[in-house]
Image (cartoon, rainbow, N blue to C red):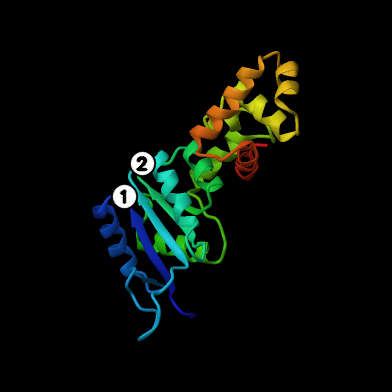
Amino acid sequence: MGEPVPVSVVALDPVLEAGTKSTLYACPDVTVTEPDTPGAPGGPAAEPQVVVMIVDRFARAELDMLRATRDTAGRPAVVLVASDLTPGDALHALAAGARALLRRREADAPRLSRAVLAAARGDCTLPPDLLDQLLNRSGAAGDAPGWAAAGLSERERSVLSMVADGHETSEIAQRLAYSQRTVTTVVHDITQRFRLRNRAHAVAYALRAGLL
């Protein structure tokens, strides 16, 4: 058996954070680190390999927190634990960099430990029923149900697909019989809703989520 995987916990709710830490303390293959926990006597603070992010619901604030966690030094793997997860939540979380998804009612010590260890290896794990829903809804590449699961309308799907194909705003407007202002508004709405930086980031997001 190798060294325990260093894990930290982040949460918007301190009660959820404390409960998750308590669960992780029962996992012999992981070690819970704190910001001031030394990596060795006299050494620097321990850097987590995996971060367990515990949330009540998965909305914009939680999505921002997930991205901020992934952007920290060392780019730790993230295990997201939420009260409930819809297929759309799962797509957004995976596209933002989560390695594992768990519902809080399923996050006992053995399951949470397995998810953390899998994330540390670079594997991705989801609840089997949620994975089935994603596969059933996604269908073939570009199929409308997969976009609907991510909260994108047919119009948004059409516009973003053409952006991914390299078309300019004027070409998209002409082909879809929209005004250029409508096309610009659609792209702006998508980038604002999912906290994306620009058109290229929107396309990359969709590709990572398996929607293009």
Residue drawn at (65%, 40%), measured in percent from left and top? 200
Q: Position of residue 169 (x, y in %)?
A: 70, 25
C-alpha span from label 2 to label 1: 10 Å
Q: Secondary structure at mark 2?
A: loop
Placement of the C terminus among the 4 image quadrants: top right
Of badges 2 and 1, the one in the foreground is: 1
Using the image, determine if residue 184 lies above or below residue 63.
Answer: above
Number of residue marks: 2
| Numbered tag placed on residue 205 in the rendering | none
Q: Residue 131: name its quadrant.
A: top right
82 vs 28, nearest the viewer: 82
Q: Which of the marked residues, 2 or 1, is nearer the chain's N terminus?
A: 1
The amino acid type of the residue labelled 2 equals Arg
Residue topped by disc 2:
57
> Label 1 neighbourhood size at 10 Å, few (<14), some (14-19), many (20+)?
some
Residue drawn at (36%, 85%), measured in percent from left and top? 42
Using the image, determine if residue 194 lies above or below residue 71.
Answer: above
Residue topped by disc 1:
12
Q: Residue 121: name its quadrant.
A: bottom right
Q: Position of residue 170 (x, y in %)?
A: 73, 21
The amino acid type of the residue labelled 1 equals Leu
Q: Is residue 206 left or right of residue 164?
A: left
